[in-house]
Amino acid sequence: MNADSDEVIGELLPGTTLYLDQLPSINVVAEASEEVESVEFSLNNQAFSVENVPPYALAGDTSGDYKAWTPSVGNYLITARAFSEDKTQGDAGLPFSIAISVVVGSSGSTTTSTTTMTTTTSASLVTQSGDFNALRGDFLSLHYDHAPDKDDGHSAAADRTILETDFNCSFLGNQMLAVGGTYGRNKGQYNSNSEAVMDVVWGSCGAGWLDAHNNWMQVRSQLYQRWKAVITSGAHVWVKEGGQSNLTAEVVRLLRAEGLDTIAKVHTVQHSNWNEQQTHSSELNYVKANTDYIRIKDANAYLNKRCPCSNEIESFVETARNHPVFGTSWTSAFDYYDPNNRVDFSDTGELMWILGLGNGDVPRANYMGIDILEFGQQYLN
């Protein structure tokens, strides 16, 4: 919205770049249904303003005369959340977020619009196990649904063990993100106790994790920004899809609206029929069509052992709990999902494929990573 003329400039799209040299006085207005009585705005996750009467404007207005929002150079996450009563009372709607950038300079327009999408064909890709290139700046997006099975707790501990061992804390802080709550149809079966495990596993060594269950729109925007930066730098994004593909689909849509080639640069690795079945079909089809979708052999075949366990598996559990570096992570995971029932980090098979662990020189359908005992020997002894 042009705050000088009170005229509409256009729709603010995800990833919009605003150029200071051409920027008039602006305001941002949230369109809302008749049931809405107030809207809360936040800027970069900090409370910014509350509007109790329409139009609901970020910087406010006086009877439709818009006040100006004057951003400085930087990146902004603008979030609006509607409420059914004044002063953010009553029923709250889902937050809606838009990520934008403000830069010095000028362009042909003060805002960007949807650009022509660049495409390539999946058949042209030669992606193989182990093509992940950390030196190129490739990025890992580790997704866990935590709904309903608790094996994701074991997988998180295994993933952390592999990545810190094979790379370092700098890699964990800069070239990966873990995301919890990446569910689909199984949303109602989410295990909130998993959050304590994620805190322990990803809460140190420069790592971190995003809580999609409690902050879906915010996490979508954060992933969009990270993936976009990776792709525009010439590197690749690798999604360890330890759950459903709904969130991946939403992020990819934002990237393709920018004209980014997600088929060549976003690699989605999935091992489970169940995960696919629990993804809404429209979202799964979109990810298959618009990323390099890599379906590998179900890793439950070698990374899932139901107990009572063999002496070797019991020894693995003891070694993992007492490991001087990773013992805290494994203990949290085992407290969450009792290894006396089973030891299962089958979703880690996807990370193994990405990094080239196991027999990666075979067709995807026949791929097998290292099994539980081999994992223990390589990473815990």
Image (tube, helix red, strand yellow):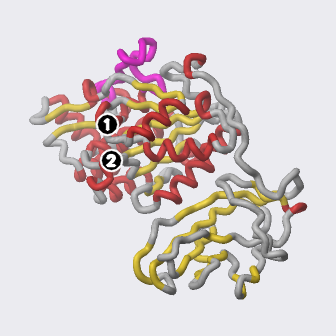
The image position of residue 303, as x and y in percent, is 27, 30
The image position of residue 268, as x and y in percent, is 48, 33
Residue appearing at x 19%, y 31% in the figure: 305
Residue found farthest to the left: 308
Amino acid under label 2? Answer: Arg
SS for callout 2? helix
> Residue 325 versus residue 30: which sits nearer the camera?
30
The image position of residue 50, as x and y in percent, is 58, 81
- Left or right relative to 142: residue 253: right
Query: Residue 16, which numbered label?
Result: none
Marks 1 and 2 sit apart, C-alpha to C-alpha, by 8 Å
Q: Do callouts 1 and 2 mark residues in contact (Cβ within 8 Å)?
A: yes
What span is colored magenta in the figure?
Answer: 353-376
Binning the other alpha carbons within 10 Å of mark 1 as few (below 14), some (14 to 19) or many (20 upward) gives some
Q: Earlier in the sequence, mark 1 or mark 2?
A: 2
- Left or right relative to 284: residue 77: right
The image position of residue 350, as x and y in percent, is 40, 31
Give the residue pinned by disc 1.
277
> Residue 172 versus residue 148: which sits nearer the camera?
148
Task: Kindly indicate the quadrant of the structure image that contains residue 368.
Answer: top left
Give the residue pinned by disc 2.
185
Q: Quadrant of the C terminus?
A: top left
Q: Is residue 360 magenta?
A: yes
